Structure formats: structure tokens, C-alpha cells
Amino acid sequence: MEQRKPLFIANWKMNKLSKEVVAFVPIFYEAIQSVSQKCEIVLAPVAVYLSKLIEATRSTSIQVAAQNCGGAKSGAFTGEISPVMLKELGVNWVILGHSERRHVFKEDEALVSARLKAAIEEGLLPVFCVGEKLEERKSGQTFAVIERQLKGLKELSENHLKALTIAYEPVWAIGTGENATSAQAQEVHAFIRQWLSKNISSPFANGTRILYGGSVKADNSSQLMAMEDVDGLLVGGASLDPLSFGEIVKKGLNS
Ligand code: PGA
């Protein structure tokens, strides 16, 4: 099996002012110094502080992600930020299809797919989020929902898809304090990998990282990372504090 380097992403959502963004870096980097070669780390601030964070992380191995991007290079799309602009700033990663984008801001499959295609075409590394709502899980539709959300990937070439990371984030686990158990996460991650193998290719499925997100904390990161198909973590609330996120990374790697 191809090596999948552990990947930890902090999704700060609409939090942290510029001073806090900058202050986070040295404290966090010192905390993870001993393990920084064993994994990849990506921080996702709000768009207006991307430049600040790029500057603050310049002499570190920490990478930077946008929390969304537009689905075209330029044009009449008020409020959107194009992937070309992100690349120009020096941003390499972008989170797409996050549950809050899908459910609070009503981004549908077609819109998320357009964003994904545009991001990949500009050379960004997308973290494509999927996940079911509580009622969907309760009514046994988890796999059907995930399958529907993954379907758009079939329209992209395997060469384009090389840039992709997938994040499984059950909607009921995001910001609720109730994480999926490691067994629940593993079950869906294995399903996603099988789907990738069947619909894209087996080497692609084996080489693609699948992250878990949803109420990840320092006391569950090791159990989640111990699962065969969990290759990293996408962390919201518990990534806001540099020492807490540092613990998540270190405990996750010790598994
Ligand atoms: P949470 O958020 O860790 O606060 O549950 C995860 C996410 O939304 O990416």
C-alpha cells in the first residue's frame, strides 16, 4: 500500500483576529517540533488573514488553507474569492464542501463540484468534505448520502484527482462534543476507500488520504488515528488553542 503521510488540519472557521492568528504560530510550532517531520500540518484561517498567516509560517513546515474558493477564475461573483487569487497569495490548500457551507449556506452538489474543479485546475490541493446528518444516519442512509456527495469526483480525471484529500465529517459530530466512535469513523472511511477503488482506481484509493472531522479532541485523536483508514484529522473548536491542537497532533501520531 502506498504511504499516506498523516495530515492534521486546523479549521478555524470565523474565529481569530489577525493578532491571534500570528500569535498561534510560534507556540504551536514549538509544541509539535519533535513530530513535525512525521506529518503534514495545515492551518485554515479566515480569508482576510491568509497573507498574515503565510508570512508568520514562512520559516516553518506549516502550510496554509483557505476555507472555501470560488468556482471560476474571475467574473461577476460578488463576495467570492477565486482559486487564482488564492494561488497568487501563496495559498496551496482549500477546504471545500464543508458541512457549514453545504447546510448553512446551502451550497449544493453542483456548486461544490464547480468549486472543486476550479480549485484543482488552478493547482490547489482541495480537502473535499462529505458527511451525513443525524436523521440520515438514523434512517440508515449514511452510505447513500456519502455516495451521492462523492459522485461528482467521477467527472474529474485521475490526474486531476491526485491533488485530492477527502474528509469525512458527520454533521451530527461537528461542534457538538459528540465525536463518531473510532469504529463508526473506520466503517465510513473504509466505505469511501472502496468507492474510490471501484469508481476511480485501486492505486488512487490506496494513496488518497481520508481525514476524520467532528469533535476531535486531545483525548480521542489517538483512538481515531489508530484506525486503518483514518489518515488524519480535520479539527475545528479544539484547534483554536495552539497547545490543544499540538496535543491532538502528538497523540494522533503516537497511535
Ligand atoms: P469541530 O469542527 O472539531 O469543532 O467539531 C470540525 C469541522 O467543522 O471541521
Image (cartoon, rainbow, N blue to C red):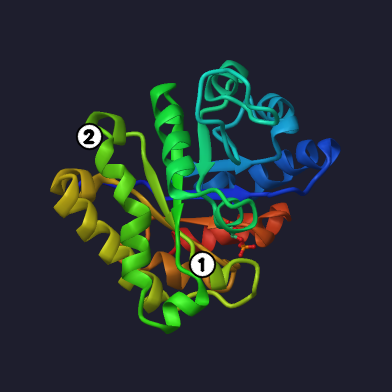
* Three-letter code for the amino acid on which mark 2 is drawn: Glu
Packing grade of label 1 (10 A; few <14, some 14-19, many >=20) is many
- Does 177 sit left or right of 194 as displayed? right
- Does 53 sit left or right of 247 as displayed? right
Residue sitting at 22 percent across and 49 percent down?
Answer: 205
Q: Position of residue 102 (x, y in %)?
A: 55, 53
Q: Could you say whether the residue bearing mark 2 is in a helix, strand or loop?
A: helix
- Towards the viewer: 192 or 211: 192
Residue sitting at 70 percent across and 31 percent down?
Answer: 79
Q: Could you say whether the residue bearing mark 1 is in a helix, strand or loop?
A: helix
Question: Quarter holding the C terminus?
Answer: bottom left
Name the residue tied to disc 1. Answer: 221
Disc nearest the viewer among 1 and 2: 2
- Does 135 sit left or right of 142 as displayed? right
The image shows residue 121, relative to residue 113, as above or below, that is: above
Residue sitting at 43 percent across and 48 percent down?
Answer: 109
Packing grade of label 2 (10 A; few <14, some 14-19, many >=20) is some
Name the residue tied to disc 2. Answer: 158
Judge whether residue 239 can be spotted in this image.
yes
